[in-house]
Image (tube, helix red, strand yellow):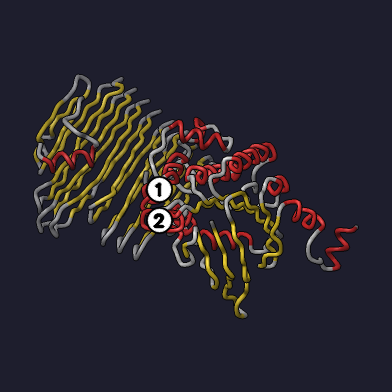
């Protein structure tokens, strides 16, 4: 691996070397490394770009890493990855996309991830997006996540985009069966003239299903963020969505939570707050000897931690 | 150590200007100084002027002989002025250990963090990784606030009503904290307080009322006049009190 590959792998997947367990590393449209394990099988799709990941029922404490790197300016792709997670699994899935664009062309990765979470399975899904480059080419990522959780299944999704992505339109749709639960934590920071749209739709179809969708974001410079979060309660269920944004400079943030109850036993809550960094927070840290700039950095770093 | 020369502070109001502090002359040398006086008298404003949150509209502030009147909050903090807020600030995502590290300006060992927290009656095990957010009670926040000033180990520390919002049980421990600070005081401690027990351990008591310095002296000189009451309340209030 070269230095750029190493840096991007670290940024998107916390990887310092080739991971243990199952993995697939994709660079500029080609797999540059793939390994299945005894319980996790990675199979390339025949009809389109992408892979199928089959996780055997009862697989526990194993992980799958599927980072994507784009280092060729102007490269665009659409990739379909399907995760078939067997009953009673307990696994960690790490995806992520890093773009290094040092040219003038627009680099674009559209990943469509579909999760079939089996009965009573638990998965933690971590997805990070990172862009860098010294050219004028734009870095674009439009991830779509489709989630279907069967009875008693649980998915935790952590998504982060902290740097360098010029435009992103991320869409997540989820359907939950009886007793299934979904937790989504999004962290987002935009700067320059970046645009980021987030769109979550969760259908709580099953009895005693639950969802908690939490977004924390910081919008700097002239960037623009739009946050949609829809939770539909179609049964006895619990749904909560929260968007908390810090706005700075000339940025713009829209938060549009929407909750719909189609059952008298659906309990749904939404919260949304947008505001600048509180002056007294800055003052407190300045009385500890930090400059205003340092205080601002600490507050943002904590907020997005 | 700290010298206020003719310090005044005015704010603009609809009908002109309002004088919050007028011609304050005060010298604070090493030791334990308490500022007391009625609500709205200008005590907290005076603290904020010393720390740099407000800038005096007139007068001069000297710290160790150096003019700091126009220095920023950060510059004053770096020169060794510490400040505990009357109403501590909450932060999403910043933990107790993060804040104490920022306060100390260096990496703290678990043992050191534990030492600062136990000073204010908190067990590090329960608090070290807690976020300084709405999950902490007012009293807990207040103690963490005091711990951040202890962690700075500044030669000049200002506490604005440290006892406010702290339960009676913890209050006894808090007094012990300040007694200990006084005993091994390497510099000055300035405390705004209404508590007789805090005033009792002060080397010097300063009374501020109506934006002016009314009295400066030892506790034996000041306390009797305080308890006797200052000023003359209106008839309605006087009737209420004597009923």
Task: Identify the residue shown where x is 21% and y is 32%.
Answer: A65
Q: Chain of mark 2?
A: A
Quarter of image, res A151: top left
Res A227 visible: no
Which of the marked residues, 1 or 2, is nearer the chain's N terminus?
2
Which residue is farthest right? Answer: B243
Q: Is residue B44 left or right of residue A18?
A: right
Q: Is residue B163 left or right of residue A266?
A: right
> Which image quarter is the C terminus of chain B in?
bottom right
Q: Which numbered tag is attached to residue A246?
A: 2
Residue A57 sits above or below residue B152 on the image: above
Task: Identify the residue shown where x is 49% and y is 54%.
Answer: B81
Q: Position of residue A55 (x, y in %)?
A: 24, 25
Q: Is residue A259 left or right of residue B34?
A: left
Query: Dots 1 and 2: beta carbons under 8 Å?
Result: yes
Q: Position of residue A239 (x, y in %)?
A: 46, 42
Quarter of image, res B98: top left
Q: Is residue B133 left or right of residue B196?
A: left
Q: Can you identify the residue that label 1 sits on?
A: A303
Res A209 visible: yes
């Amino acid at each position: 691996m070269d230095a750029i590959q190493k840096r991007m792998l670290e940024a998107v997947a916390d990887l310092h070397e080739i991971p243990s367990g199952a993995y697939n590393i994709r660079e500029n449209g080609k797999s540059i490394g793939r390994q299945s394990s005894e319980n996790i099988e990675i199979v390339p799709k025949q009809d389109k770009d992408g892979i199928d990941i089959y996780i055997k029922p009862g697989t526990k404490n194993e992980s799958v890493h599927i980072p994507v790197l784009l280092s060729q300016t102007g490269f665009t792709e659409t990739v379909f990855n399907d995760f078939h997670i067997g009953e009673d699994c307990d696994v960690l899935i790490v995806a992520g996309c890093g773009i290094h664009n040092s040219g003038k062309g627009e680099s674009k990765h559209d990943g469509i991830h579909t999760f079939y979470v089996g009965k009573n399975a638990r998965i933690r899904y971590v997805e990070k997006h990172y862009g860098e480059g010294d050219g004028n080419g734009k870095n674009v990522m439009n991830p779509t996540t489709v989630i279907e959780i069967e009875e008693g299944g649980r998915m935790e999704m952590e998504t982060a985009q902290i740097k360098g992505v010029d435009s992103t339109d991320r869409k997540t749709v989820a359907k939950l069966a009886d007793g299934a639960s979904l937790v989504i934590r999004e962290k987002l920071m935009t700067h320059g003239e970046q645009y980021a749209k987030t769109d979550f739709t969760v259908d709580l179809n099953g009895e005693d299903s639950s969802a908690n969708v939490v977004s924390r974001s910081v919008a700097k410079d002239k960037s623009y963020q739009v946050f949609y979060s829809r939770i539909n309660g179609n049964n006895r269920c619990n749904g909560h969505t929260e968007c908390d944004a810090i706005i700075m400079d000339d940025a713009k943030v829209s938060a549009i939570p929407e909750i719909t109850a189609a059952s008298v036993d659906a309990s749904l809550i939404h919260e949304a707050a947008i505001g600048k960094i509180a002056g007294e927070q800055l003052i407190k840290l300045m009385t500890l000897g930090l400059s205003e700039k340092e205080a601002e950095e600490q507050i943002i770093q904590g907020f997005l931690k | 150590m700290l010298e206020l020369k003719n310090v005044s502070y005015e704010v603009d109001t609809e009908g002109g200007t309002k004088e919050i502090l007028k011609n304050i002359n005060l010298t604070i040398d090493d030791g334990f100084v308490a500022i007391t006086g009625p609500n709205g008298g200008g005590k907290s404003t005076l603290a904020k002027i010393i720390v740099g949150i407000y800038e005096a509209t007139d007068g001069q502030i000297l710290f160790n002989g150096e003019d700091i009147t126009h220095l920023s909050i950060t510059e004053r903090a770096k020169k060794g002025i510490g400040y505990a807020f009357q109403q501590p600030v909450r932060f999403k995502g910043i933990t107790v250990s993060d804040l104490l590290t920022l306060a100390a300006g260096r990496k703290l060992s678990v043992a050191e963090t534990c030492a600062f927290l136990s000073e204010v009656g908190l067990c590090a095990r329960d608090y070290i990784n807690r976020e300084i957010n709405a999950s902490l009670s007012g009293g807990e926040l207040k103690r963490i606030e005091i711990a951040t000033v202890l962690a700075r180990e500044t030669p000049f520390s200002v506490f604005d009503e440290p006892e406010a919002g702290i339960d009676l049980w913890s209050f006894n421990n808090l007094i012990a904290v300040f007694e200990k600070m006084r005993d091994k005081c390497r510099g000055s401690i300035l405390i705004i307080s209404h508590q007789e027990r805090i005033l009792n351990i002060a080397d010097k008591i300063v009374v501020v009322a109506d934006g002016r310095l009314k009295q400066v002296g030892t506790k034996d000189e000041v306390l009797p006049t305080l308890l006797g009451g200052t000023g003359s309340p209106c008839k309605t209030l006087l009737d209420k009190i004597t009923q």
